[in-house]
Image: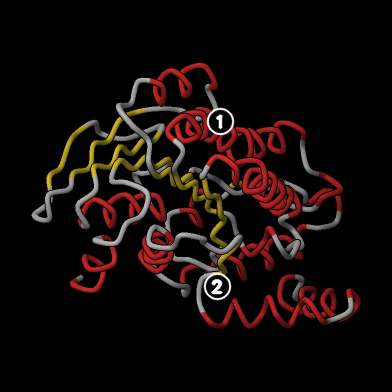
Amino acid sequence: MDREILIMKKNLYGKKVFVTGASSGIGRACARMFAMNGCDVTGVSRNTEERTEHFTGGGSLTLRRLDVTDEAATRKFIEGLAEVDIAILCAGMGVAGPAETAPSDLTRKQMEVNYFGTLNAAQPCLTRMRARGNGLLIIIGSIAGRVSIPMQSQYSASKYALEAFTDAVRMEMKQYGVKACIIEPGDTKTGFTAARETQDAGGAGYGSTLEKSVAKMAADEQNGRSPESVAKVALTLAVRKNPPARVPVGLDYKALMMLLRVLPDRSKEFILRKLYLPK
């Protein structure tokens, strides 16, 4: 903890922090870690007990109920905040199933939460940051936003969209002093696993394959890193004048991303099929 406090003393962006998805998982870890390092954090979630917690380092965490898929309510809430120096957008959910049978309602829900929910929060935050000439936007993406995962086509698509969005924001906001970057966690042990929604695709011949694939995902996630490991990455970005465009979490995933850059598509697909499409 001493190292984390020392890091935050060099915070270049300010101590008013806004976090989505703050009641659980990565969002909760980010909200608490910034609050423990002296920041005044406002965290929102669709389902949370509204309360304020104060920390010994002088920071605080105020939790409020907000559904980020409600564009008007999200904009109104963010415009009502005193300041937004750092925004960490974590709200998300997962859908599993084959691309062929993906029902439109689940696909739309996936994009509404992961992409449009992020967009709804990002836009008013960026407006506030641009007006003051400083700010840091951190979006929680996924390794699945760089490498499409079989049986997670809709989830990967939503995270790919966030990669493109963050890249554009970074270029557009540079002249205004606002930085944007995306953190790319791999397997992380959170409630995301239990909350994943899985299609009923047995009638299409995917039943056994889908079941084994989802079981593999769940096992990997529950044996994965802690959400605090992602929060620590977010914390380190607040001390960097020019934070990197994207940050995979952990040396293993950084190495994997470097390897996948040079592998031909056929080799990448062979590896992914072996991992996620067990016989």
> The disc labelled 2 sits on which kind of residue?
Asp
Q: Does residue 279 show up?
A: no
Q: Residue at x 52, y 22 (%)?
A: 70
User: Mark 2 and mark 1: span between their CA atoms?
Assistant: 34 Å
Residue 103: quadrant of the picture:
top right
- Point out which mark residue 220 bears: 2
Q: Is residue 237 above or below residue 60?
A: below
**Mark whose residue sits in front, 2 or 1:** 1
Q: Residue at x 83, y 45 (%)?
A: 101
Q: Residue at x 68, y 75 (%)?
A: 257
User: In which quadrant is the C terminus drawn?
Assistant: bottom right
Which x, y percent locates residue 67? 46, 28
Seen from the viewer's position, the closer of residues 266 and 261 is: 261
Give the side of residue 112 with respect to residue 136, left or right: right
Asked if marks 2 and 1 touch (Cβ < 8 Å), the reply is: no
Indicate which disc, 2 or 1, sits on the residue closer to the N terminus. Answer: 1
Which x, y percent locates residue 56? 8, 54
> The disc labelled 1 sits on which kind of residue?
Gln
Q: Residue at x 24, y 48 (%)?
A: 39
Which x, y percent locates residue 9? 24, 61
Which x, y percent locates residue 105? 71, 31
- Point out which mark residue 123 bears: 1
- Point out which mark residue 263 bears: none
